[in-house]
Amino acid sequence: MTTRTQVAIVGAGPSGLLMGALLHRAGIDNIIIEQRSADYVLSRIRAGLLEQTTVDLVTQAGVGGNMLAHGLEHHGFEISFNGQRHRIDLQGLTGGKSVMVYGQTELTRDLMAARSAALLPTVYEAAEVALHDFDSTAPRLSYRKDGALHEIACDFIAGCDGFHGISRASVPATAIQTFERVYPFGWLGVLADTPPVSEELIYAQHERGFALCSMRSKTRSRCYVQCSASDTVDQWSDARFWDELRLRLDPEAADRVRAASSIEKSIAPLRSFVAEPLRFGRLFLAGDAAHIVPPTGAKGLNLAAADVRYLSQGLIEHYQEQSAAGLDAYSAKALRRIWKAERFSWSMTRLLHQFPDEGGFEARLQQAELNYLVGSTAAMTVMAENYVGLPLE
C-alpha cells in the first residue's frame, strides 16, 4: 500500500510535531512516522526552558495557548559557588529578553493534541522503518504496521527521530562526518511535587559536584545532581538525593529544599555531538538526529526548534516560491548556530562540573573563571546573550 505526501517526517517528538504544524499552516501535506507509541513519547522527561525564539515559533505554529497561559517567564537565573549565589540579570543584560519555563512533555502534548484535532496523519508504533532513494528526486519511506507493509512516496524526508533514529543511520558513512565528546559523569534528575527552591533557576558549582534547582510549575520541581557515569537509579533513594542536593547548595537555598517522593527519577549521560552536513539529497536531519548538547546550557530543545524553523522555511519557499535557496542554505545556516550552542553548552559544563580526571590546577582555574564572571558586566552579558538565545539568521 503506497501513500503520497509532500513531506514525510520521521519522529513524533517535539521537533517532528513542530515541523508538521508549521508545514500544515503553510498548506504543505505531511505525514509523521514514529516507531514508538504516543504514550512512550509523552513519558520522556526532558528540558523545560524555552528561548524567546522558540516561544515565538510555537506561537506561530498555532499551539502556544497553554504555553503562554501556564509557562513561567524568567528574567534571570543564579549561579552558586563558595556558599553564595550571584544573579545573572537576563533582562538587564540583553535589552529586555527573557526565557520561559514550560516542560517539554507539556509542549509535546500540546503539539499532539493540535495535530489530532486537525486530523493530520501520524503513524505510531511503526516497525521496520526504512528510508529509500533520498539521493534521487523520488524518495520513499517504508514501514510495517499491523503486519502489513506500507510505503510513503514523498518529495522530501525530514529526519527528526533523535540520536538513535533511523534517519542519520541511513546515510552512507562516507557521506557524513561526526564530532563527539562524552563526559565522564551524568545528571541524576528527580521530578517531584514540591515547591521550587527559588523563583529562578539555581546552577550550583560545588566540590561534591554540580547541582541544578529548576521547576515545571509553582508546585512542581525538577532538580539534578551530578553523579558518576557508572551510577544507577537504584543506588539513589529519594532521601539520598535530597540530602545530596542540600549539601551542594548555599545555606539559604538548602534550607528551602522540601523533600518529596519522586514522580520520575532518571540518569542522563552527558555528551556533545554534531553530524555534518545536515542534507543528503532530499533527506534533511534536524534536532537530536543532527546534534546533542549537554543540558547545562538548556539548548537542546531550543536548538532543535531553530533547525525546524530554518528547514520549514526552506520547504515553504520551495513550494510557494519555487525557490531552492532556503533548502540549499539549510545545512550551513543550521550548523553555524549549532556550533555556537555547542560552544556555550561545553563552556557552561566546564565551568560548573567536577571532572574526575582533573586536579588542583584546573580547580583553581574554575574558581578564577567564576569569580571573573560575577565581577564583570561584559562576561555576564556574554553569558546572558547566549542563555536567552542568539539571534536567528
Image (tube, helix red, strand yellow):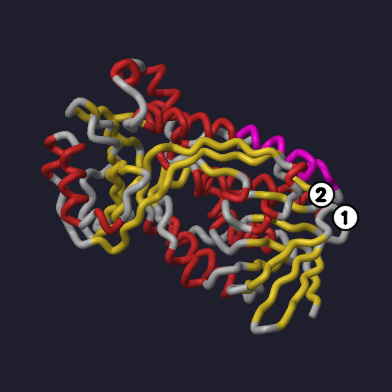
Q: Position of residue 124 (x, y in %)?
A: 59, 73
Q: Position of residue 360 (x, y in %)?
A: 29, 18
* The C terminus lies in quadrant: top right
Q: Along the line of sight, which residue is nearer the eye, 184 or 3?
A: 184
Say if mark 2 contacts mark 1, CB within 8 Å.
yes
Which type of secondary structure does the marked residue at label 1 adopt? loop
Instruction: State which quadrant residue 265 falls in.
Output: bottom left
- For the record, the magenta segment spans 323-337
Whether residue 94 is visible, yes or no, is no
Which type of secondary structure does the marked residue at label 2 adopt? loop
Q: Position of residue 235 (x, y in %)?
A: 25, 54
Magenta residues: mostly which secondary structure?
helix
Q: Position of residue 146 (x, y in %)?
A: 64, 83
Q: Which mark sits nearer the N-terminus, 2 or 1?
A: 1
* Amino acid on which the number 2 mark rests in the picture: Gly
Q: Is residue 310 left or right of residue 197?
A: right
Which residue in the protein does label 1 denote? 136
Residue 263 vs 1, above or below: the answer is: above
Instruction: State which quadrant residue 123 falls in.
Output: bottom right
Q: What is the number of the mark on residue 281?
A: 2
